Amino acid sequence: MLDTIGPFFKNLYDTTGFNFIMFYEEYEYDRFIDAIFVSIKLIIACLIFSLVVGIVGAWAQGAKSKPLRLFMAGYIQVFRNTPPFVQLLFFYFVIGTITPQVDAGGYFEPIVGNFGWAVISLGFFAGAFNTEIFRSGIEAVPTSTVEAAEALGYSRMKAYIYIIFPLAFRVCLPALNNNLVNLLKTTTLAYGIAVPEMMYTANQIWSDNVNVPEMMLVLFVYYIGLVGILVWGMHRWEHKMRIPGYG
């Protein structure tokens, strides 16, 4: 790949001064490609974790246990009303310092690294919004449908899994789409705890080579592409899951 595009970008730099060094210099190219994969892994992990938190949280909001409902209400208020970057730093520098460490051969490493704390923190942040999104979808399911499930002998858990949530999920998809797009963009905050994703690596490259405009352009195009792919995929998913006459 570098052999193909390298001469063009090297000539571009020599003739115009536009320095896209990661496209013609091997060292910068390697860490740029690594950053792409780290970013994608971080985004996928955060999206999946936030969805799991949202699904479980929406179920817990309707639980019979009052302490569980109060806990969920507190969780939602805390994570919706504090900045995600503050939450990220809190998890990494506060919770991270009191978690167990393992011997890595002469020095100790925490069980959860910076990548893991980024996933946990950002997943819980978006999960609080997902919980409310799923709750609104559950409340949109007709009461008669819930009563029909109970009449058929479904337990609350089985009715939630097989009937209520599949219908609620279809109602939630437009709002969920927006929240997942916001989460994708929020993953750039992981640079604050040195996760080597795209934002962090771009910062390193422009610090070493003083090519800030070029790197900002690459970042801009990169995230437009990722958001476009996610929105396209979510819209396709929404269309395929649509039930005629419902939602």
Image: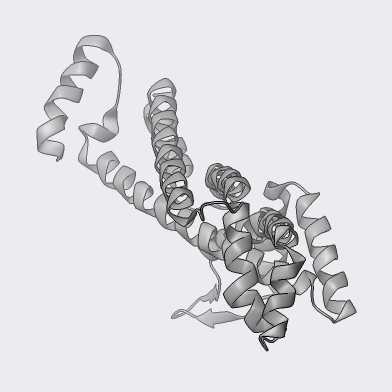
> Is 159 placed above or below 7 here?
below
Picture quarter containing residue 110?
A: bottom right
Picture quarter containing residue 53?
A: bottom right
Picture quarter containing residue 124?
A: bottom right
Task: Please name whichever residue, 158 or 39, is drawn nearer the observer in this view of the structure.
Answer: 158
Task: Please name whichever residue, 28 or 116, is drawn nearer the observer in this view of the structure.
Answer: 116
Q: How many marks?
A: 0
Q: Percent x, y for residue 22?
A: 28, 35
> Is 106 placed above or below 240 here?
below
Work out which quarter of the rendered image holds the N terminus and state it: top left
Seen at 62% across and 53% down, the residue is 172
> Is 71 placed above or below 224 here?
below
Is residue 69 visible in the rendered image? The answer is yes
**Residue 104 shown left or right of residue 19 in the figure:** right
Task: Please name whichever residue, 8 or 98, is drawn nearer the observer in this view of the structure.
Answer: 8
Tell me, what colour scheme is on the image?
one colour
**Residue 185 shown left or right of residue 133 in the figure:** left
**Residue 65 shown left or right of residue 171 in the figure:** right
Q: Percent x, y for residue 246?
A: 59, 54
> Is 153 placed above or below 88 here?
below
Q: Percent x, y for residue 18?
A: 30, 17
Seen at 75% across and 74% down, the residue is 60
Seen at 66% across and 57% down, the residue is 130
Task: Please name whichever residue, 10 or 86, is drawn nearer the observer in this view of the structure.
Answer: 86
Seen at 56% across and 65% down, the residue is 49
Is residue 117 visible in the rendered image? The answer is no
